[in-house]
Image (cartoon, grey):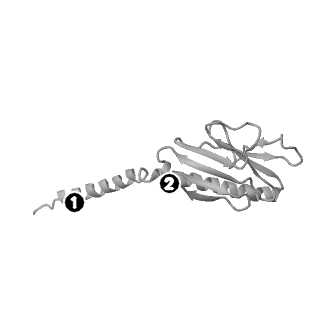
Amino acid sequence: MKSKEQGFTLVELLVVLLIIGVLLGIAFLSPITNSVHKTTKKEAVRLQVLFSQIRDQALLENTEFGFSISDTGQYEWWVLPVGLGPRHWKLLEEKPYQPYQLPHGYSLDLTTDEEEQSTNTGQPADHPSVVIFSDRETTPFSLALVPEKDAKETLRLKTDGLANVEIFHE
């Protein structure tokens, strides 16, 4: 009586190792491939959604809100409580409007009709650069999201003050 040997052949083992190698290669290279574009797009869409939400909230609550870039490079959202003058802006701390620091290697350049400001120059700490009014109008602005690794991937958020904030590739 012959015993039947069990096990894998060398070819079967090599095929399994090849499949594992291909899957590992895809898994490790996927985040690297086009990651600058993906991160830039993700952050731009996040900002676009926040601007849309805050415009709706301004209308619903009959309140003015604001947006600025701090001297540390994070962006901040503001609220002007009803009945108080323009010197009483308060920084928002609740989610999703808490101060937000972009991932390392990204910067914001904000341009409005009144001023031109970059994250490198800082923002006065007592008021926003962009105001979102209770009738959904906004200070016209252009906000560039610039990745240091690849400036060709820069995305710009723009509005004329009446239309929604749109994203453009530079």
Nearest the eye: 82 or 2: 82
| Image vertical order of residue 103 relative to residue 2, above or below | above
Residue drawn at the location 34% of the way across and 53% of the way down: 25
Kindly identify the amino acid type of the residue bearing the numbered disc 1: Glu
Marks 1 and 2 sit apart, C-alpha to C-alpha, by 38 Å
**Mark 2 lies on residue:** 38
Decide if residue 100 is on the left or right side of residue 125. left
Measured as percent of width and height from the top left, residue 76 is found at: 69, 44
| Residue 110: numbered disc | none
For marks 1 and 2, the one nearer the N-term is: 1
Residue 164 x, y percent position in the rendering = 69, 61
At x 58%, y 51%, the residue is: 43
SS at mark 2 in the image: helix
Residue 12 has which mark?
A: 1
Residue 99 horizontal/vertical position (percent): 67, 42
Q: Secondary structure at mark 1?
A: helix
- Quadrant where the C terminus lies? bottom right
Q: Which amino acid type is marked by label 2?
A: Lys
Residue located at (77% from left, 58% from top): 137
Pick the quarter of the image with the N terminus: bottom left
Q: Nearer the viewer, residue 7 or 101?
A: 101
**Crowd rating for badge 2 (residues with CA inside 10 Å; few <14, some 14–19, many 20+):** few
- The total number of labels drawn is 2
Residue 94 drawn at (x, y percent): 72, 46
Circle 1 crowding by C-alpha within 10 Å: few under 14, some 14–19, many from 20: few
Q: Residue 116 falls in which quadrant of the image?
A: top right
Residue 35 visible in the picture? yes
